[in-house]
Amino acid sequence: MNEPTLDKFPPKVLAKIGVERAFIVSRLIVAAERLQLFRLLQNKRMKAEALGRALKIHRLYLDVFLNSLVSLGLLRKANDIYWNTALTQKYFIDERSIYWTRQYSKECVQSYAALNLLEKTLTSGRSYKSIKRLHTLNYTEAMKRDRHRAEDFTQMLFHLHREDAEALTNYLDLSERRAVLDAGGGSGVMAIALAKKNPHLRTCILDIAPVCRIAAENVRRARMSTRVATLPGDIRKQLPAGYDVIMFCDIGPISKRLLENAYKSLPAKGLIVLVDRYLSKDGTQPLDRLIGQFVASSVRPTTWADMVKVVKSCGFRSVKARNEHGDLWFITGIKVRPRTTG
Ligand SMILES: C[S@@+](CC[C@H](N)C(=O)[O-])C[C@H]1O[C@@H](n2cnc3c(N)ncnc32)[C@H](O)[C@@H]1O
């Protein structure tokens, strides 16, 4: 997966974008995504008027909007006819599923609203939602109520996490393992990849029911239904037994309680696997995780070193943390023997 990071843009375009203007530029691109302009122009050339009609853009803003995108290097223009540039085709169409277009552009718009109150957030220590007294559902509850939301979010991650899944399968040696529980397994991208790479292995995606239905479809399409199962449930409750590997990939903050539950459900010598973009020891990387704090979640991200401490404190031994792929960390640990309480 490749993101249209700024280095992908022509240098002469970038040189014209001042830091303050970057906000407007970014919002324009998100508007183009939300209106699905680039998808409308896929393998097509269209006149401004036809584009305006199809996307319901007012004539007052039509030309300036399209021309700004030409100026940015995202569209080309000749005689009032517009088409996608190679950059647009590659990063906004070929390498981006429709779910990503829809979900990500929606999240961006929510972020802009939150950023309007950034100074207030910084000085009060309160999140955007608390300042605005927004009583929104958490994302799992929202997905339970709206199947389109569940589909956009889950299938966006199916696409986005493919490279992470490949890195994980290359890193983990599961030759001696029998069954993996992918807790909060979402689309099944990880569980499917692990089962494909290890033909002896069974995997199971534990997630909320609407997400499991989407994952089951992905498993069926991957022709892996005999070895990859889905299990609707709540990862905060007792985790099912019968798995010698329990994995948590990108499920947000992992509490000590969650890890203790995993410890209880694993057999002796069972393996715990955590996969996430943890902060560096000094808290200065990765940038994405840091700035996400101002728009998405008010839960402080954890450093990989702190996560290692929590894993050890739950009784896991031979705990290893490896940064094998981009900003992604893999933390593993082994359950030595059943823990005695008291
Ligand atoms: C960001 S997604 C990651 C999905 C997948 N692990 C991956 O790496 O692509 C987090 C997933 O955890 C699931 N999840 C969060 N809280 C949960 C809970 N209490 N019980 C079951 N699933 C939960 C969500 O529904 C979502 O599918």
Image (cartoon, rainbow, N blue to C red):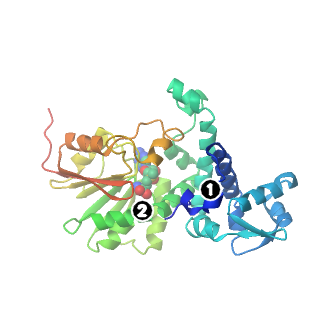
What crowding class fits label 1: few (fewer than 14 Cα within 10 Å), some (14-19), or many (20 or more)? some
- Secondary structure state at the residue bearing disc 1: helix
Residue type pointed to by label 1:
Leu
In primary-sequence order, the first of circles 1 and 2 is 1
In the depicted view, which residue is nearer to us: 265 or 272?
A: 272
Name the mark on residue 188.
2
How many numbered badges does the structure rendering display?
Answer: 2
Residue 211 locus on image (x, y percent) = 48, 56
Q: Which residue carries the number 1 mark? A: 14
Residue 284 locus on image (x, y percent) = 39, 42
- Secondary structure state at the residue bearing disc 2: loop
Name the image quarter holding residue 273.
bottom left
The answer to whether 105 appears left or right of 156 in the picture is right
Residue 313 locus on image (x, y percent) = 20, 39
What crowding class fits label 2: few (fewer than 14 Cα within 10 Å), some (14-19), or many (20 or more)? many
Residue type pointed to by label 2:
Gly
As drawn, 297 above or below 30 = above
The residue sitting at 80% across, 64% down in the picture is 51
In the depicted view, which residue is nearer to us: 51 or 65?
A: 65
